[in-house]
């Protein structure tokens, strides 16, 4: 079961809950990330919409995203709401939950390989990755990209580091995004070929400013050239593409050549 380090959630925290018991006045759910801690959802916190029976909205065994609205730490009592969860919050929490489930599965595999328990895997790997990268699965992603160095930076030691690196590279697939531009360049001077070469290579080195990016430039058919930029997210890809085309445009002006940049959709 996916877990949290703390014993109780915070007010306004989004939690995953499984509906266990339903009454006319409300329902009880177990909080999946808190060791099955029971929480109560009052009738008026079930839905914005009108309903005749609470059972029209909630079903026993159903897993939903709830928002914590009250916490009594002395009595370990928690109240939650379903109606206060915005669609965007629900989507974000479900995404986080799926990543946490994947991370726990990898921790289980690592523990099995070393003959250790899942609790030990969390202590030796999981919580260290969470402390350093903000999320356990993010630590696995960094390991897939950078190898054992990503684990050592987070304080993960042998023999865990070698096993986790092996699992991350085998099971964590890093998705990339790609954007492309067509650059048309014409240099009519006698030394136009030399000027063109300088323009087309003006961006060299810029990709080193951005982690985990790739740039590929090739001829479509003179005077048209294509630039492909790959990154882990669109924001980074767009920023790098802007720098590349700006560098080429500035160099073209300096060399007295014409240039037109067209983004491919």
Image (cartoon, rainbow, N blue to C red):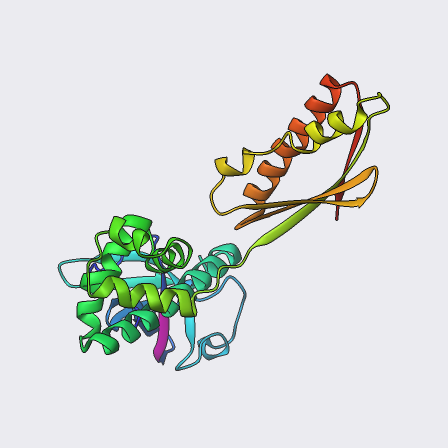
- How many marks overall? 0
Q: Quadrant of residue 201?
A: top right
The residue depicted at 26 percent of the width and 58 percent of the height is 9
**Is the N terminus in the top left, top right, bottom left or bottom right quadrant?**
bottom left
Q: Position of residue 234 (x, y in %)?
A: 58, 46
The residue depicted at 32 percent of the width and 52 percent of the height is 150
Q: Is residue 175 above or below residue 131?
A: below
Q: Is residue 17 magenta?
A: yes
Q: Position of residue 157 (x, y in %)?
A: 19, 58
Q: Quadrant of residue 58?
A: bottom left
Q: Is residue 141 above or below residue 249?
A: below
Q: Quadrant of residue 78?
A: bottom left
Left or right for 155, reference 226: left
Q: Is residue 128 above or below residue 234?
A: below
Left or right for 178, reference 14: right
> What is the residue that sits farthest to the right in this orientation?
188
Foreground residue among 100 and 24:
100
Foreground residue among 58 and 169:
169
Q: Position of residue 239 (x, y in %)?
A: 58, 36
The part of the chain drawn in magenta is 16-20
The residue depicted at 70 percent of the width and 46 percent of the height is 180
């Amino acid at each position: 079961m996916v877990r949290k380090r703390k014993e109780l959630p915070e007010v306004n925290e989004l939690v995953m809950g499984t509906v266990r018991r339903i009454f006319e006045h409300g329902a009880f759910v177990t909080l999946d990330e808190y060791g099955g801690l029971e929480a109560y959802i009052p009738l008026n916190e079930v839905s914005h919409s009108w309903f005749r029976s609470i059972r029209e909205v909630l079903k026993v065994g159903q897993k939903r995203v709830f928002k914590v609205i009250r916490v009594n730490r002395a009595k370990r009592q928690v109240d939650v709401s379903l109606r206060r969860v915005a669609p965007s919050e629900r989507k974000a929490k479900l995404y986080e939950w799926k990543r946490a489930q994947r991370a726990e599965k990898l921790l289980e595999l690592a523990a099995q390989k070393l003959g250790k328990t899942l609790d030990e895997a969390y202590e030796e790997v999981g919580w260290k990755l969470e402390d350093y990268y903000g999320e356990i699965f993010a630590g696995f992603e960094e390991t897939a990209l950078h190898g054992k160095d990503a684990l050592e930076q987070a304080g993960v030691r042998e023999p865990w580091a070698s096993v986790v690196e092996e699992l991350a590279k085998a099971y964590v697939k890093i998705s990339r995004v790609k954007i492309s531009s067509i650059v048309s360049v014409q240099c009519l001077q006698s030394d136009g070929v030399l000027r063109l070469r300088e323009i087309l290579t003006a961006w060299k080195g810029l990709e080193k400013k951005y982690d985990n990016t790739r740039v590929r430039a090739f001829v479509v058919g003179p005077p048209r050239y294509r630039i492909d930029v790959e990154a882990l997210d669109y924001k980074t890809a767009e920023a790098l593409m802007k720098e590349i085309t700006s560098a080429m445009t500035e160099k073209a002006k300096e060399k007295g050549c014409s240039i037109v940049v067209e983004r491919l959709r």
